[in-house]
Amino acid sequence: MTGLRCFLVFLFSMHVLPVLSSVQELWWNLTYVENANPDGLFERRVIGVNNSWPPPPIYVETTDLLVLHVTNHLDVPSTLHHHGLFFNGTPWMDGAQGLSECGITPGRTFDYVVPINSSGQSGTYWVHSHAKGQYVDGLRAPVVLRRPQESYAYDEEFTVVVGDWYHEEHPVLIKRFISPDNADGVEPVPDSAIVYFAQESGYLKSKAGTIPSPVTLSVGFNENATLPFEPGKTYRLRIVNTSAFSMFFLWIDGHDMRVIEVDGVDVEESPIDVLSIAIGQRYSVLVTARNDTIANWAIHANMDPDMYDYVPDSLNPNVTASITYNHSAPLIDHGPISSYTLTNDSAFVPVERIAAPTVKRTIELEVTFDEMSDGTNRGMFNKVTYNRPLVPALLSELTLGTNATAESAYGPTSFVLEHGEVVDLVVKNGDDGDHPFHIHGHNFMIMGRAKDYTSDDPVLNPPIVQNQSNPMRRDTIHVPGGGAVTLRFVADNPGAWFFHCHMEWHLESGLAIQLIEAPLHAQVLLSSPRHQSSNDDDGHDSALSVIRQMKGYCKELGLPSEGNAAGHMSRTDLSGWELGPYPLDAPEGRGKDRGEHSGRTELGEGYWNDLSGVWLGGLVEDGVCG
């Protein structure tokens, strides 16, 4: 009891220590917006906020508590995920459909309480829907957490948002992608690229003399977008890639860039000519303005066409915005470069030095894609494709009691981690294409990379160096085809967290796992004095009432909200939860039935369940992740 009492005291102190802070409240009504045309090529319906698009940027001081009041006026469930924020102590606020919640029912409201003032986090992030691929349709916005005293001095800052853009809506695209008619798994190629700018809580308008689309009249996109520079000033540019499928390369003609932040981690200043930015990644760079005003300069934001199976003749993957010194001066555009080089993020040095702890557990994850038993093409870790559970994993963790420690209760793509366990995720990319992987609830340390994980050559597949004094940390990593990366993190955030490919099409085709972290400690979170109270000091609902609200939304959506992944108070009984499809090389005659689920300790290449006679793989329903 002494240990439990100490743990409760720790949780209590973590949440109620006095902090000089204020509460920043935002009200977002999720709405459809007609006739948006950011690329100037095609008008289409998008998902916006308060009947406008794009959703407003969020700019918060790190001394503040953010409360985002969200009302869902869509005709489908929705969520909001604050990408890169840890939610340590409040995992129910992570906003991942099927993992932390069932979703906000149409017509209902949910308050996302983001404890920035107690998180210790600062830097550049973004918020996006994590339900049914809605961020592909525009439900995404940058988030800046600004410290009173930053690590580097600068005169002014802007946020640079890049992303790919589709002319068809996500439900149409995903139905075409996950189909027997697309057995090769050819992903939807975007119709264009977009780049636009924000400053604090607003977007920069179009350049003078341009005629933008009426719906997005207040925002400048691509050639209509410009950053106003003054000679001699130093600017911080916070860069966010909000794409569904595309990596970007960014550079500025006539100017030098120095990287100072990577995914919310301040790093020692590092010069760079061209910055590669994978989906979900964020960087801050310092740019010192020129001393003359005789010209304006192009900002290049180019999508990587190597990501696509084909490049349509209609697609221009290269877009430019500009830096303006003088409205009457000419624009200098040096044009494209001959080749791209990936940014070596392992070489950055965090300002806050943290030594790598000794690893306790290693989980190897091999990425493959293949045609499945139903004729569709799916993404898999270790030959198992993710299936969204009927009960969100976090609600299983919080309601199963002592059974919550059983890995089998969460389904075949789940790992239960002990509290404080040091874990290495070894991600082996067996696919030809590159992939960006994102972890929820944590940063990881980049312990090492391999160019060819199948090679015995130590140059191509070097051993991991242990006892590193300050390895680079971030939350989203780019892994080239055939390569591998070793990612180390400490399981110090009780809850349930995704690790997934951030290419939206790949997440929805099953390239994800669940990390079930310290289940009994997660249950204790609800027992803390702070979370048991009927109201928090700021007037917002306690965790217990939030969980009740979440369960109510599950019920309204026809889903269970307690028990294991299938809604049973059992470690093994997953009856009623349909599994599949299965790799074509699954054992003959297996995988066509459903039944109970037996336990196992690691995610292997599927496994034969002796209790039920089922080959257990996984299933992802079309359009249910994201």
Image (cartoon, helix red, strand yellow):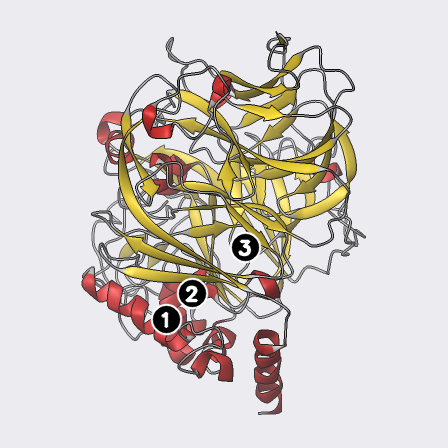
Relative image position of residue 372 (x, y in whole percent): 30, 37
Q: In which quarter of the image is the N terminus?
A: bottom right
Q: Is residue 139 above or below residue 325?
A: below
Identified by mark 2, the residue type is Trp
Q: Is mark 2 on a helix, strand or loop?
A: helix
Q: What residue sits 36% from the left and 68% below the top?
A: 395
Residue labelled with disc 3 = 85
Identified by mark 3, the residue type is Leu
Q: Is residue 508 above or below residue 67?
A: above
Relative image position of residue 78 (x, y in whole percent): 31, 51
Relative image position of residue 546 (x, y in whole percent): 36, 71
Q: What element carries label 3?
A: loop
131 sits left or right of 222 in the view: left
Disc 2 vs disc 1: Cβ atoms closer than 8 Å?
Answer: yes
Disc 1 vs disc 3: Cβ atoms closer than 8 Å?
Answer: no
Residue labelled with disc 2 = 92
Residue labelled with disc 1 = 546
Q: Is residue 149 among the parts visible in the rendering?
A: yes
Q: What residue sits 30% from the left and 57% below the top?
A: 103
